[in-house]
Image (cartoon, grey):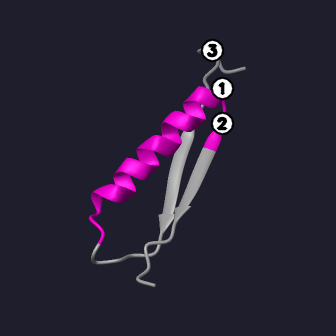
Amino acid sequence: MLAFGNFTLSIGGTSIIPNLEKPPQILIQTTDEALYQAKQSGRDRYVFQSLELCNH
């Protein structure tokens, strides 16, 4: 236990393959969604998403 009390940590992350046709905001939006999923799952959680932004 810390001298000033306990703390929890929720982390959201995203990995992508860059694509010039997709706006950079999609990375921020997806990471934000992952963070909120981690927070909704409880304390001390992490959620990472992987986006494939390739032209196939």
Residue reaching furthest bottom? Answer: 56
Q: Give the overall secondary structure of the magenta segment.
A: helix
Residue 16 drawn in magenta: no
Residue 42, which numbered label?
A: 1
Q: For mark 3, does the 10 Å Cα neighbourhood hold few (<14), some (14 to 19), or many (20 or more) residues?
A: few
Q: Would residue 49 be found to the left or right of residue 53 on screen? A: right
Residue reaching furthest right? Answer: 1
Q: How far apart are labels 1 and 2 at the CA level?
A: 6 Å
The residue labelled by disc 3 is 5
Q: Which residues are magenta?
A: 22-46
Marks 2 and 3: which is nearer the front? 2
Instruction: Please tell me which residue lies in front, 3 or 47.
Output: 47
Marks 1 and 3: which is nearer the front? 1
Q: Residue 28: x percent and y percent?
A: 36, 52
Q: What SS does tag 3 mark?
A: loop
Q: Quadrant of residue 37?
A: top right
Q: Residue 10, can we see it?
A: no
In the displayed structure, 41 sits above or below 18; it is above
Instruction: Please tell me which residue lies in front, 52 or 1.
Output: 52
Which amino acid lies under the numbered mark 2 shown in the image of this protein? Arg
In the displayed structure, 45 sits above or below 4; it is below
Which amino acid lies under the numbered mark 1 shown in the image of this protein? Gly
Instruction: Please tell me which residue lies in front, 56 or 29.
Output: 56
Between discs 1 and 3, the one toward the N terminus: 3
Which amino acid lies under the numbered mark 3 shown in the image of this protein? Gly
Residues at marks 2 and 3 touching, judged by CB atoms closer than 8 Å: no
